[in-house]
Image (tube, rainbow, N blue to C red):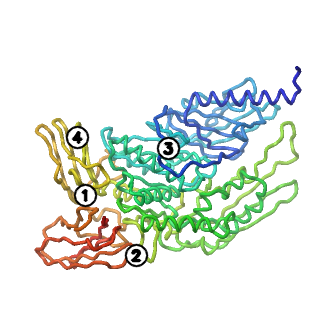
Amino acid sequence: MKLTPLQSLIILTLSLLVHGTQINAQICDDWKSQSTAYVVTGSTPADPGYYIWEAKANIHGVHLCVLNADVIPVYIQQNNNYINFTSRFGPSTALLYMLQLEVNINENGFVNVYSGSAKQDIVWYGSSASFPLLGDYNLKVRVTFFDGTIRFREYNIKVIPQSQSLYKDNAGNTLRKWQGNDPNGLNAIVFSEGFDAYNTNPQEMYYYAAADLIECFRNNGYDVFLLDNYFGTQDIRNNAAVFASAVEYISYMYGQELIVAGGVSMGGIISRYALAKAEQDGNPLPVHTFIAIDSPHQGAIISEPLQNFKKSNEAGDEFAKHALSNEAARQLLMYNAYDPGGSVHQAFFNELNSMNGDGYPHLTRNIGVSFSTNQPNPNSGAWYKITYHTGPFSGTVKTFDLTDAEMLAGSWLPQDLTTMSPIIKQASYWWLQLLVPGITPLYYPTIEFERFTDPTYIPYYSALDIRNGNSMFDVCIETESTSWHDVLPEDILEDIVNEVILTDTYFQHVFVMGQWSLRGKKVAAGNYVTLLMSQGDVVVLPGGNLDIQASEIVMLRDGFSARYGSVLTAKADPDLYYECNSESGTPDMLKPEEKSQEVIINKKMIATLKATIFPNPASDRIHIQLSQARTKAITIEVYNVFSELVLYKYIPAGDHPELNISQLNKGPYIARISDGEQSKTCKFIKL
């Protein structure tokens, strides 16, 4: 039977699509689009047990859509990447096929990558060798399509360090690990990604944005995991289940040790939901510290007039609408043009804030970070102008003024909104113009954008979750000067690192072989120092070497022993401090007055009295251990989650400081311990 031209084209299309998909799958388990003309939507269960993780070959694959003319940053791993140029405008759809593709790096002339039969996917196998050094490159691409047209594209290549491991689950979510400088260490930290409307923000983008912070953790012995969600805009509850499963998997790989967990932007909400829900369900996650970095705990702000204008100009364009018309954006934004009444946002935060009593995990030390000060946004007036042309004549101009909400104290809307925020800037994501092959229009539609100043995006009160004047976090870190939401302020790097490393560290049910190290503010080791880990002795075996350093106190409890032939070093040093710029990557000892003063502990109350509550959690009675000899009477005030005083006790000088808490209801409490001159606030859990 003779095929018609249309039938031949359909068969060619199907064969090319199947062939291209098979090749890509064979060479890489982790292809991520960084430029795309379509978005894949869907949902996965809100059940952590659904997700099954396994190690994969550590190769980084990048899809770049040549249909888009935007000049964008592209993030790749050093000596570990393939770049695939694609003309797809759907998972299995392409009309513009490529005959030839040439590249030009740093204006050194065009070099041929492919020339031959028509393809919708061209893999550049030599991309790793073409960008050998860490840093930035300029890449120009010349594409010849099968209809004879030639298009030019340009990308700014950002090369980051290679990851050491890749893990993937049965739903397509991925974890990448960048190993720290202590191969025998048990310190791990996992960050969840933020909002990713078009699944174009891979782990490599987050590494580049927070390189100084990540490398400081790595230089101080921490392995850093970055989690990428396959469906980045699905219900936050579902991605919280993904996060919970990832935390369990990482802890399992580290001998079921407690780890650090949190997220950036929306990732802080994802991780907070996961941790609070796990505790509420009676299955707390193996986490000792939770950190949320500039996260919208009461919601985020994007200009209401701009959203409404965008919505009115994207009718029928499902791709453009997806930036705001998705479940995660409805949950996060205080105003969303696709949920103007805010019912989705309100319902989600009502649920979150009531979960586990107050919306937070109680068995962790909770750190909140704001990229802004508490000073109102100094900007006002017009901030954004759009000029768009849909024909050969004059276009439409629309100017937007800052609203009252956008002038509150808070971090600023990113300048490039393709990073961590709902996309409202790039033309290809507003009005995708796919030109039919063989037809050249008299003009090309254009959209011009001009930004005059910066609106508030994550309010200060939202990042630190301030309710009735008090933050819900145990530790609040804020910058000295307001920054953009996607720019990590340098002045808080060491604050974050020290608050994470110098936290309460628990060690139990472990046999120490080889060289191990423990770091923390309080380090407790024994057979039952925390209920978050299985009960059992800590034994340093012959030949084992355990080094413990704490900034406040080392507590060796019942069940701890070091056998003959082992080495045990334990030191409590109040000047222990980690400096990110240390060339040796080891902690530097600084005088107290040299340390940053941007860390605010327990509701802005600087704690100078050294005190520890144990056991914690407790059911009937708690004891207070003071790190210095006590010559004064102390008072203990206990507050519930609503900041109401529920218990008070005066303890004369010389008496053992303990408190009967049997009459309290189950839940979290704050104890304020004071000797009249100095004070300390500690969180404890009543079982």
User: Which residue, given by chain and number where applicable, does mark 1 sit on?
Assistant: 522
In the picture, the quarter occupied by the C terminus is bottom left
Q: Earlier in the sequence, mark 1 or mark 2?
A: 1
Give the secondary structure at mark 1.
strand
Distance (Cα) linking label 4 and label 3: 31 Å
Distance (Cα) linking label 2 and label 3: 36 Å
Q: Quick check: marks 2 and 3 in contact, CB under 8 Å?
A: no
User: Which residue, given by chain and number where applicable, does mark 3 sit on?
Assistant: 51
Q: Nearer the viewer, mark 2 or mark 3?
A: 3
Q: Earlier in the sequence, mark 4 or mark 3?
A: 3
Amino acid marked by disc 2:
Phe
For residue 642, the mark is: 2
User: Does residue 493 appear to the left or right of 532 in the view shown?
Assistant: right
Distance (Cα) linking label 1 and label 4: 19 Å
Callout 4 crowding tier (Cα within 10 Å): few <14, some 14–19, many ≥20: some
User: Does residue 501 appear to the left or right of 291 in the view shown?
Assistant: left
- Kindly identify the residue that appears in the image at 86 percent across and 36 percent down: 438
Amino acid marked by disc 3:
Tyr
Distance (Cα) linking label 1 and label 3: 34 Å
Callout 3 crowding tier (Cα within 10 Å): few <14, some 14–19, many ≥20: many
